[in-house]
Amino acid sequence: MKHLSSAAAGFCFAFAVPGIVQAEVEYRVAVIRVDAPGPMPISRLDLPPPDLGFAGAVVGTADNATTGAFMGQTFTTETVAATPQTAEAEMRRLLDAGFPYIVTLTDAATTARLADLAGERALVINALARDDALRGKDCRANLLHTAPSDAMIADALAQYLVWKRWNKWFLIEGSHPEDQALAAAYRRAAEKFGAIIVESRVFEDTGGARRTDSGHVQVQRQMPVFTQSAPAHDVVVAADHAGVFAAWLPYHTWDARPVAGSAGLMPESWSPAHEAWGGTQFQTRFEKSAGRPAREEDYQVWMALRVIGEAATRTKGGDDAAMRAFILSPNFDLAAFKGQKLTFRDWDGQLRQPVLLVAGNVVASVSPQDEFLHQVNQLDSLGIDRPETECKR
């Protein structure tokens, strides 16, 4: 457990007006990451760093302090690494300690339980779980999302593929529930934007593939045969949230076709390759602070912290109810190095944001694509729109 304080924020701008002393306002945020046991990733390069997500909190707290220093505001962030067995107890401890803003890094089911525990005592910001149900039938009034949803990333990729006229998709999905949910998002995106899924196949996780050299070789050799005899297609789309097979698809498919989705051309909220719109400035500051490139989890936690900081700047008084109302109001926006201001959807608490389409060390494109318009906000062409939502907040 770590406390990150905005030490510089003790400096108060009120000194510029003689005789006036501005009362200091403290904003307390907690970041709780639930580390669940699981199989090793395919590549050691994908091993999560010990400070995953927490490093984003460090930079976010420092950024909040920069502005807060001139307004008599201090920001304190506590980071907590929990397990599935201790997550609820840690949440209760944070609530009892009076934290009004809690950022979560955990799966959808645990996110929902923690939000229920918080109730009206805290605003919860989901910085990891992408499940559409968490923004739909399982949404909570006290829950916001800086992590993009499955529907958003599927729509982002679909727009690009359709723009490229790669309209015939061979969809391969994993056997885990999160894989199937992502595959459902791709099916929805294909229908939405006029693509055709010529065939869908399920890659069964039999265990061991990510744990041993022999397992790696087995999956690698299996891919050409597994992808053989597919109908004519333009692209292979992989839905592999669990990280079992997708990395073995590029250069191993039976037909010479590009791979997209969970491997190849990947839709992501952030990438170390992103340099446009001031992204280099964020990358440099993050790398100086953490000693490594920023991952999606870091960026999504950073955004959550900046949501609180931006609302504090605009509301000033430290009233939690006023903060919540402002965050969901049309007047709120967040600058996040993506070329436009980001806002929350009032119907499901999702932060609107462009999605990067990343191919290795380059950002190949950014969605929404210019050709896909929307009657209200072009960012709402990504994900579940107001008329479609099942959320009842």
Image (cartoon, rainbow, N blue to C red):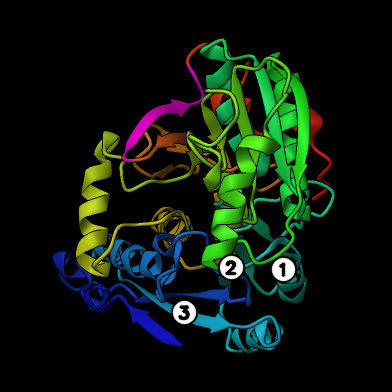
Q: Quadrant of residue 69?
A: bottom left
Q: Tag 3, which secondary structure?
A: strand
Numbered label attached to residue 106: none
Q: Earlier in the sequence, mark 1 or mark 2?
A: 2
What x and y, as percent, mark residue 360?
Answer: 37, 40
Q: Residue at x 61, y 54 (%)?
A: 218
As for residue 24 lying within the magenta part, the answer is: no
User: How far is mark 3 from mark 2, CA to CA?
Assistant: 10 Å
Badge 2 density bin: few <14, some 14–19, many ≥20, Cα 10 Å: many
Q: At label 3, which amino acid type do we have?
A: Thr
Looking at the image, which is closer to me, 319 or 333?
Answer: 333
Q: At label 1, which amino acid type do we have?
A: Ala
Q: Residue at x 30, y 61 (%)?
A: 63
Badge 3 density bin: few <14, some 14–19, many ≥20, Cα 10 Å: many
Residue 295 is at least partly visible in this image: yes
What x and y, as percent, mark residue 14?
Answer: 22, 68
User: How far is mark 1 from mark 2, CA to CA?
Assistant: 9 Å
Identify the residue position indicated by label 2 in the image.
104
Part of the protein shown in magenta:
361-369
**Principal secondary structure, stretch drawn in magenta:** strand
Contact check, label 1 and label 2, Cβ < 8 Å = yes
Is 333 situated above or below 12?
above
Instruction: Say whether residue 305 is left or right of residue 16.
Output: right
Numbered label attached to residue 79: 3
Q: Earlier in the sequence, mark 3 or mark 1?
A: 3
Badge 1 density bin: few <14, some 14–19, many ≥20, Cα 10 Å: many
Numbered label attached to residue 115: 1
Instruction: Say whether residue 65 is left or right of residue 149.
Output: left
Q: At label 2, which amino acid type do we have?
A: Thr
Q: Earlier in the sequence, mark 3 or mark 2?
A: 3
Please state which of the two labelled residues, at mark 1 or mark 2, is closer to the viewer.
2
